[in-house]
Image (cartoon, helix red, strand yellow):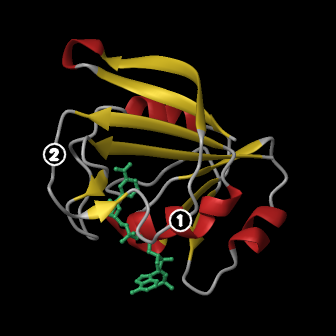
Amino acid sequence: MDVVLIAAVTQDGFIARHEHETVTWSKDLHIFQEQTAGFPVIMGSNTFKCIPIPLTGRNVIIAHRNDKPKDILKDLSAEKCFIAGGGKTNARFSDLLTHAHLTPHPLIFGGGIPLFSEPIKEKNLVLKKKISVVPDLGIYQYQYKIK
Ligand SMILES: NC(=O)c1ccc[n+]([C@@H]2O[C@H](COP(=O)([O-])OP(=O)(O)OC[C@H]3O[C@@H](n4cnc5c(N)ncnc54)[C@H](OP(=O)(O)O)[C@@H]3O)[C@@H](O)[C@H]2O)c1
């Protein structure tokens, strides 16, 4: 199964200003909705609490601190699933990621919740596709395979 990290990030690698922030600055929500439709979406409980409207049409799995990432994935029977944050959850699933769909935004927060909240193993990414999000603002989603 493909395990796809999906995130909107600032140019300095943050996904939120603080752990309770509802992300209203990202411009790629429509892409998130399209790509995750019909697939399991795994997110941490902080992220779940920050979502303003329920995500319908997909199996949303809330990851808690005592859950084992491998056990969560083992129970899924899908061609792919998405890891949708936040930084703690991304870090916990980092060893299991096969792909990353990242949308850098023209913002610098200077601090906050990083894409991965803990140190993780180094990874090499191979660009597979670049999708227009808001070309006038220079916003694209980069789809990588993780080697
Ligand atoms: N820009 C983006 O694309 C994007 C995407 C997703 C999320 N976000 C943002 O990311 C932020 C949340 O990220 P996050 O990293 O704080 O949380 P998170 O990964 O969403 O969820 C926190 C997870 O860690 C556990 N946890 C909470 N406090 C902990 C602690 N002190 N030590 C160990 N585990 C702990 C929770 O489990 P329990 O339930 O057991 O407490 C939960 O599993 C929100 O602002 C959200 O909007 C941004």
Q: Where residue 145 appears, x then y in whole percent?
A: 65, 35
- Does residue 83 appear to the left or right of 15 in the view shown? right
User: Image quadrant of ligand 1?
Assistant: bottom left
The foreground one among 121 and 73 is: 121
Furthest residue in direction bottom, as rendered: 66
The residue shown at (37%, 23%) is: 140
Point out the image quarter for the C terminus: top right
Q: Amino acid at mark 1?
A: Ile
Residue 136: name its quadrant.
Answer: top left
Q: Which residue is mark 2?
A: 108
Q: How dense is the environment of label 1, judged by Cα within 10 Å: few (below 14), some, or many (20 and up)?
A: few
- Does residue 103 appear to the left or right of 128 in the view shown? left
Residue 25, numbered label: none
Residue 120, numbered label: 1
State whether residue 92 appears in this view.
yes
Q: Amino acid at mark 2?
A: Ile
The residue shown at (76%, 69%) is: 70
Considering the numbered disc 2 on the image, is that residue within a helix, a strand or a loop?
A: loop
Q: How dense is the environment of label 2, judged by Cα within 10 Å: few (below 14), some, or many (20 and up)?
A: few
The residue shown at (43%, 27%) is: 141
The foreground one among 16 and 109 is: 109
Image vertical order of residue 64 relative to residue 134, above or below:
below
